[in-house]
Amino acid sequence: MELPRLEDVINELSRRDLMRFIERTMPKYSAQWFHRHTCQKIENWINGEGKPRLMIFIPPQHGKSQISTRHTPAWILGNKPDTKVAIAAYNGTVASKFNRDVQRIIEQDQYRQIFPEIKIPAAGVPSGNYVRNNTEFELVGEIGGLVSVGVGGGLTSRQVDVMIIDDVYKDAKEAWSPIVRQSVSEWYSTVVETRLHNDSKVLIVFTRWHENDLGGELLKSQPDDWEVVKFPAIKFDEVNPDDPREYGEALWEGKHGAKKLLDIKKRNRTTFDALYQQEPKAKEGLLYGEFQTYTEMPELKGAYRIEVYCDSADTGSDYLCSILYTTYMGKHYVQDIVYVQDGVEITEKILAKQFIDGGAQLAQIEANAGGRIFARNVERVYKNEGGKKCVFKAFHQTENKEARIYSNAASVTENILMPVGWHMKFPVFYEHVTSFSAIFKKNKHDDCADALTGVVERSAKHTGQYYTAST
C-alpha cells in the first residue's frame, strides 16, 4: 500500500487542527502554550462542544487577534463553507483591516492546498453575482462568506452564524465613558443579537478596561450563557487548572517579561489589574501608583516650556488647583502647586504671583462655570503686577471627567515628576492624590486628579511655541 505524502498529511492535520492551520499558513508564528490552549477552546466552540458563546480575555500584544479574528474565520470557512461569519471591531476601519487579512490568508498557496475547494472572487474583477470588497466577501459556489462592521454599524437583513467581536473600545477613555459603554451595550442588544439564531455562535475577545464593559455586562446579565478563557499577564492565582505557570510567572516572558509588567503595576495598579490581569477593579483601591521625584531640574539643553494648568473651583467646596511645571523631553517637572478653597478675589492674586515667580510662559485655564472671566481677571492682575511673557489660554472642557481621569492615570504617574518632599510642600494636595480611590464616587474631591490629568492632556494637544535654553 502506498503511503500518503507528508504534505498531504500536514494539510489534513491543518484542516482538523486550528493551531496547525495557523502554523501552516503563517510559518513564523511563535506559538506559546496559551495560544495552543486558546486554539483548542475555539475548536471546541466551533464544533459544538460546550457553550455556544465564548469570551477570551488575554493581555494586549499577546497574539489573540491573530488567532481569533484573522485565522479562525478563514479556518471556519474552509471547513464549513456555508457559514455566514461577521467580524466587529471598535470602528469600521479596523474591522475592514481584519476582513482584508482574512482574504489574504484565503488567497495563500498553503490555504489552497489545505482547502482546494474554497475560492473567493478575484480582487477588482467582476465574478458573477459574488461580492468582494473591503467590508464583505462571498465564497464562490457556496452560500457562506464574511462581513465586517464597526461598533455602531448595522447588520440589517443578514443572518449571522458566527459572530466574532474584537476590541469594542478604542482606548481607555472610551471604555471609562458611561455614554460610550451604554452605546456599545445597546448596539450589541439591538444589532448583534437580532441577527443571531438558535444555533449561532458568538466569540468576544478583548482586554478588559472596566468592570462594566461589554464583557462585564454580559457576564452579569447572562452568566450561564458564556464560557470564559482568561489568562492574566502574571499569575497571582492558583485556582485556574488550565494555567501551568508558577506563582509570579509572566504569561509570555520572552515578549512581555515579569520585570516590565511589575513596573507597569507599580506605576498604575488600576491599569495593570484591568488590561494585564483582566481584573478591572483595583484590589488596593487606589488609582495612582508611586510618583517619580526629582531633586534638581535637569539642565535644559533643548526645547522646553514652563506651563501652568489651572482648574478653577466650580463650587465653594471645590479646590482651585493650579500646577506650574516645566515640560522637557516629554516629562513634566512640577515646581509649584496652588491648591486652595479661597474666593476668587484672593486666588486671582495668588495665581498672578505664582505665574510671575515661576516664570510661566503658557497658562492654560479651564473656562467652565465662569472660568473664562476668572482667566481674564488673573491675566489683568498678572499684567498689573509687571508680568509680561505669559500667554493665557482659556478653554472649555467638554469631555467626561471620570473617563478623562481614568484613561490618563497611567500617563500621569509615568510622565509627571514631583519635587522631593512634595508631601511637605503641598500637604493637602499630596493627601488627596495619594488617597484617590479607583472607585470614583468614593472621592470627596477630584480637583487634584482633574488638574494632573489636564497637565498630560493639554501638553499633548498643545502645538505652539516651545522655548529653548538660549532664549
Image (tube, rainbow, N blue to C red):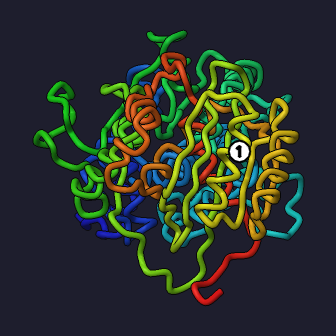
Between residues 209 and 191, which one lies in front from this camera angle? Answer: 209
- Residue 30, given in percent of the width and then of the height, sits at 32, 64
In the figure, 183 relative to 360: above or below? above
In this rendering, would 452 be left or right of 257?
A: right
Q: Quadrant of residue 467?
A: bottom right
In the figure, 369 relative to 395: above or below? above
- Residue 78, given in percent of the width and then of the height, sits at 55, 50
Q: How many marks?
A: 1
Residue 42 in view in this figure: no
In the figure, 339 relative to 458: above or below? above
* Residues packed near mark 1 inside 10 Å, few (<14), some (14 to 19) or many (20 plus): some
Q: Quadrant of residue 81?
A: top right
In this rendering, would 86 be left or right of 17?
A: right
Q: Residue furthest front?
A: 385
Dot 1 amino acid type:
Lys
The residue that appears at 68% across and 76% down in the rendered structure is: 466
**Residue marked by disc 1:** 349
- Residue 454, given in percent of the width and then of the height, sits at 63, 47
Circle 1 — which element?
A: helix
The residue that appears at 82% across and 57% down in the rendered structure is: 384
- Quarter of the image for the N terminus: give it: bottom left
The residue that appears at 42% across and 58% down in the rendered structure is: 22
Residue 457 in view in this figure: yes
